[in-house]
Image (tube, rainbow, N blue to C red):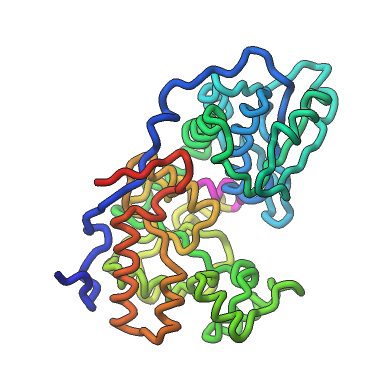
Amino acid sequence: RREHSPSGSRLIWAQRRVAEWQPCEWWQTAMPAAPSTRNGYIRIDCYGGLNQLRRDLCDGIAVARLLNATMVLPKFEVAAYWNESSGFADVFDVDHFIEQTRGYVEVVKDMPEEISLKEPFKVDCRKQKGHFDYVETVLPALLQHRYISLTPAMSQRKDRYPSHAKACYCQGCYNALKLNKKVEAKAMELLQAIPKPFLSLHLRFEPDMVAYSRCEYSALSSKSLDAIEAARGEDRNVLVGDAAHLWRNRGKCPLTPSETAFILQALGIPTETNIYLAAGDGLMELDGFTSIYKNMYTKSSLLTHEDFERMHGNTKAALDYYVSVNSDAYVTTFFGNMDKMVTAMRTMQGLQKTLVLSRRAFANYTAAGLAGDQLAKAMWDAHREDYIMGRGLALPEHCFCEFKL
């Protein structure tokens, strides 16, 4: 049986799936209501770009239930790096959030005056790892101060939560967070402007990302190389020798736009496909992609200049998020915070044409000397296996369960 055609005539989406991820039934059914008495108030302080903010907030919902605390509306911290100043209500629907969390986590807009007049006691858990326990570490501060602000641990193991806290995380993250009406209307306008059907591509090849990866790229333009060098800093030296080969073969190096175009062709994605580019500013070497896939659309090409200039960074990211969740197909070259949220929300909606391109497979096959049709066939086989098994379609976390087809 032929699994790959060198001409790229086989389409990845046409392959029969063997398994897929779906939201687990246990957290969508009724769960125990929160106790009627509370231990105090908790505000979740979120940092970073939109999807990092959302990740912190999702974690915070579970922590509030874990500590039996009343949540006040979260605070989106101003981050100079993201050039960002928007708040929770600028992006998300506050009333929807309060209504959807009712019964298992109490969320309020206002607090009693004697509490609201003072600043919350700050608890920053970002650096905590491993067996970190919120009840042991944070509950005493909540009981003492009655009002705390909390930044959740970045790598907290949610499988250690009791079932009611896990259920709150899933309910809050995937049912309670909805874009506010103004942002959603703009996102729908953008979605309608894209020619159908279309593929949303989250392409990551910005100077800071490449600098952070510590990978070397020899075939880039001098403009791109200068931009990478400017973003590198003293602690991001390029890896060399065996360390560089090992690092690249572990899939740590971002795919270039031309490498991305090559893989899409290997997967049978026609070059006339309408592609929405979900990406921030500063993408480098884009000609390597658009010289092959010419029907490309972006926020800035479809929205009026006035609309685009007025938007915060989080609003722009929200548009990309909305379009990607509702696209006919979604492909990403990186599995970061946005990709995790998009793939999970697509899984919630049963949208299966979702794929994370394998940087590891590409690095290993090119290191072995494969090129041209041989490399295309190897990439086809690797991604076909991922697609039919449902790998990368959703977060392999407790909110989603694997089903054999």
- For the point 36% across and 84% down, the residue is 370
Total marks placed: 0
Q: Quadrant of residue 207?
A: bottom right
The image position of residue 377, as x and y in percent, is: 28, 76
User: Does any portion of residue 310 appear in the rendered image?
Assistant: no
- For the point 30% across and 70% down, the residue is 380
Q: Nearer the viewer, residue 179 or 183?
A: 179
Q: Is residue 48 above or below residue 259?
A: above
Where does the N terminus fall, quadrant-wise? bottom left
Q: Is residue 36 above or below residue 391?
A: above
Q: Is residue 310 magenta?
A: yes
The image position of residue 335, as x and y in percent, is: 50, 58
Q: Nearer the viewer, residue 154 or 80?
A: 154
Tell me the magenta residue range: 309-318
- In the rendered structure, the answer to whether residue 135 lies left or right of residue 389 reads right
Q: Quadrant of residue 112?
A: top right
- For the point 67% across and 27% down, the residue is 67
The image position of residue 170, as x and y in percent, is: 50, 34
Q: Quadrant of residue 15?
A: bottom left
Q: Is residue 160 above or below residue 249?
A: above
Q: Is residue 352 magenta?
A: no
- For the point 38% across and 31% down, the residue is 25
- In the rendered structure, the answer to whether residue 290 lies left or right of residue 77 reads left
The image position of residue 77, as x and y in percent, is: 72, 44
Give the farthest residue toward the top: 36
- In the rendered structure, the answer to whether residue 113 lies left or right of residue 315 reads right
Q: Nearer the viewer, residue 218 or 290?
A: 218
